[in-house]
Image (cartoon, rainbow, N blue to C red):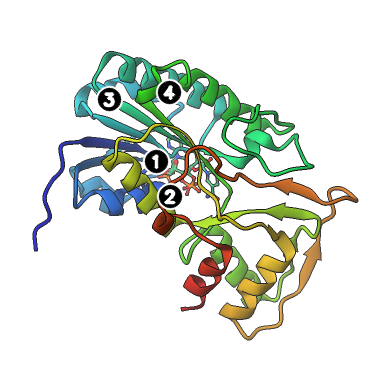
């Protein structure tokens, strides 16, 4: 059955990547959806909805003027200074058009706090270059009128096609050590849940800061061990990485901007999804 095409035109920066591509696949049957890729890709080159875009060399504004999206999704990686400029262009476009920006941020905006999990309105603070970059971008975006943006803070994302799971599978086959962080307490999510959540945010015109992680917290080492146990019979070799002597939290929990129950998840569902 042909699905109805919604009112939005969507442009996803980073649509060839793990999350950007999952979001593209989720949205493209419902909305006129376009995306960017960076590395040469014969398949995407033939697709008229995809545009080659390099954040260091190309002008995001030109692409925005050409596509005229009503939703921009930023799911990019690449040089941080160039990404700041690109996001300035996205913000400028969003400010002057009937358009909203959905930015994929990270739990790392809180990585300088270690004693508690973090909630949407907590002050951000980071010790990492990556976290600093995400905070700077979030701060620029939050100058927009509040209905014009959604900042999506993500914890570690696991999924059958995620780089993390692929790496674990390869390490198992090669009998190479897999890094685990015994003191690290996190929450987690999957690409399948994130795409449904973003679809909901678009459909219901939700805005603000979203913490899209599992409702429960897990120790990194236990969670990785459970995943491996459910996925493979090969005995893993672990490399234990201790960053501090005490337990350290890197978790983004929702308190004010809650999504409906069917869009929330528990870490167990991820193990079950990966075991299939
Ligand atoms: N995955 C996670 O666990 C996680 C957790 C928290 C937050 N996030 C955030 O989610 C977003 C997407 O992450 P991801 O895991 O999906 O990353 P990814 O798989 O590496 O995809 C990154 C995307 O950015 C594009 N890109 C890379 N370098 C570029 C450049 N120089 N110019 C233009 N485009 C460039 C890639 O294009 P090509 O592949 O074609 O080069 C790809 O489309 C990121 O902003 C990340 O910070 C991810």
The one of 234 and 94 positioned closer to us in this rendering:
94
Q: Is residue 163 left or right of residue 68?
A: right
Q: Which residue is mark 2?
A: 19
Which of the marked residues, 1 or 4, is nearer the chain's N terminus?
1
User: Marks 2 and 4: which is nearer the front?
Assistant: 2
Which residue is rendered at x = 56% and y = 41% of the image?
255
State yes or no: discs 1 and 2 in contact (Cβ < 8 Å): yes
- Res. 17 visible in picture: no
Residue 23 spot, x, y in % from top left: 35, 49
Quote the CA–CA distance across marks 2 and 4.
19 Å
Residue 50 spot, x, y in % from top left: 25, 42
The one of 17 and 258 positioned closer to us in this rendering:
258
- Name the image quarter holding the N terminus: bottom left
State yes or no: discs 2 and 4 in contact (Cβ < 8 Å): no
Residue 41 spot, x, y in % from top left: 33, 49
Q: Callout 1: few (<14), some (14-19), or many (20+) C-alpha neighbours within 10 Å?
A: many
Q: Which residue is mark 1?
A: 14
Which of the marked residues, 3 or 2, is nearer the chain's N terminus?
2
Quote the CA–CA distance across marks 1 and 3.
18 Å
Quote the CA–CA distance across marks 1 and 4.
12 Å
Which of the marked residues, 2 or 4, is nearer the chain's N terminus?
2
Quote the CA–CA distance across marks 4 and 3.
16 Å
The one of 118 and 141 positioned closer to us in this rendering:
118
Which of the marked residues, 1 or 3, is nearer the chain's N terminus?
1
Q: Is mark 1 within 8 Å of ligand 1?
A: yes
Which label sits on residue 86?
4
Q: Callout 4: few (<14), some (14-19), or many (20+) C-alpha neighbours within 10 Å?
A: many
Which of the marked residues, 1 or 2, is nearer the chain's N terminus?
1
Quote the CA–CA distance across marks 3 and 2.
21 Å
């Amino acid at each position: 059955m042909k699905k109805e095409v919604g009112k939005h035109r969507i442009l996803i920066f980073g649509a060839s990547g793990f999350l950007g591509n999952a979001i593209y696949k989720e949205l493209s049957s419902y909305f006129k959806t376009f995306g960017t890729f960076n590395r040469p890709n014969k398949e995407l080159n033939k697709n008229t909805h995809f545009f080659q875009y390099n954040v260091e060399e190309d002008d995001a504004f030109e692409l925005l003027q050409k596509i005229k999206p009503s939703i921009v999704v930023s799911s990019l990686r690449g040089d941080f200074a160039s990404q700041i400029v690109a996001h300035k262009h996205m913000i400028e476009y969003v400010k002057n058009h009937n358009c909203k920006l959905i930015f994929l941020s990270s739990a790392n905006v809180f990585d300088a706090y270690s004693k508690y999990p973090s909630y949407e309105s907590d002050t951000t603070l980071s010790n990492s270059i990556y976290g600093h970059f995400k905070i700077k971008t979030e701060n620029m975006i939050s100058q927009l009128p509040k209905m014009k943006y959604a900042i999506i803070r993500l914890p570690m994302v696991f999924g059958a096609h995620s780089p993390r799971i692929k790496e674990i599978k390869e390490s198992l086959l090669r009998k190479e050590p897999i890094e685990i962080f015994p003191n690290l307490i996190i929450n987690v999510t999957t690409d399948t849940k994130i795409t449904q959540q973003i679809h909901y945010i678009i459909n219901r015109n939700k805005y603000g800061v979203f913490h899209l992680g599992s409702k429960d917290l897990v120790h990194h080492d236990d969670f990785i061990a459970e995943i491996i146990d459910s996925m493979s019979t090969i005995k893993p070799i672990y490399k234990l990485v201790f960053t501090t002597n005490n337990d350290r939290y890197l978790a983004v929990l929702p308190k004010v901007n809650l999504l409906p129950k069917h869009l929330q998840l528990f870490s167990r569902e991820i193990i079950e999804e990966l075991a299939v």
